[in-house]
Amino acid sequence: MKFFSLLPAIAVAALGAVSVVAQDAKSIVMGVESVTTLSDSARKTTVSLSVGNAVSEFPVIVKDINKIVSTVGQLTTTIQKGSGKPLPEQGAKDVVAALTTFVKVHQALLNAIIGKHSLASKFVFTAPIAAALRAIEAGVDTFAFALIDLIPTGEETTAANKQFASLQVTIKAAVKEYK
């Protein structure tokens, strides 16, 4: 009898675990939007950097970049644990739209970081920023492969590849600036 009283709890736990791994366009879009929000927040902090606040704010930026890397990694893992089935056409369009916004915002962050290189070098923050940028580069590569695998061939695949290629150019410029 005790087994039957536990059955509803077991069913809820099993369904919860499935929903965590389940992948659909909406959850992917929400994940990409979450990373976009983190990138925009880090961009705002980066833009506001000055000689007066550099010592306190550069560690915040490094922490923010590492949070972006962690969040992208979690999203990538969730995508990789999913069904592996391509997204439906509308879902792929929604994901590419979210990706396009993410790329614009993330490029703005990276360009702001590039623009603050001389300030970072004055306060000896180039090494931690360089390390964080290399982590972003690796994380975005893995994320790109996982996401593109879900997008059916055609127009949306081309658009996603174009977005990731554009982002890679900016990431490489940022990494080069901080070498």
Image (cartoon, helix red, strand yellow):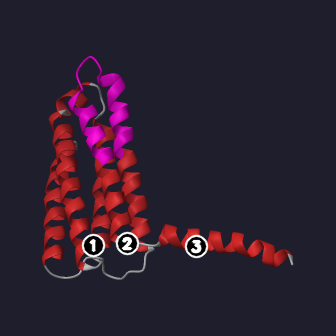
Secondary structure at badge 1 equals helix
Q: Quadrant of residue 126?
A: top left
Q: In this image, 82 relative to 2: left or right?
A: left
Is there a contact, CB below 8 Å, between mark 3 and mark 2?
Answer: no
The correct choice, above or below, for 49 with respect to 105 in the image is above
Q: What residue is shown at x 24% (from left), y 59% (from top)?
A: 98
Inspect the image, locate mark 1, and give the three-letter code of the amino acid beneath it.
Gly
Q: Where does residue 6 sit, x and y in percent of width and height? A: 77, 72
Of marks 1 and 3, which one's residue comes earlier in the chain?
3
Residue position marked by numbered label 2 in the rendering = 24
Does the segment drawn in magenta span residue 48? yes
Residue 25 is left or right of residue 1, and the answer is left
- Report the span colored magenta: 37-65
**Residue visible at 31% across and 81% down in the picture:** 86
Q: Are marks 1 and 2 in contact (CB under 8 Å)?
A: yes
Residue farthest along the right direction in this orientation: 1
Mark sitting earlier along the chain (3/2): 3
Q: Residue at x 85, y 74 (%)?
A: 2
Which quadrant of the rendered structure holds the N terminus?
A: bottom right
Q: Amino acid at mark 3?
A: Leu
Q: Residues within 10 Å of mark 2 (few under 14, many from 20)?
A: some
Quarter of the image with the C terminus in it:
top left
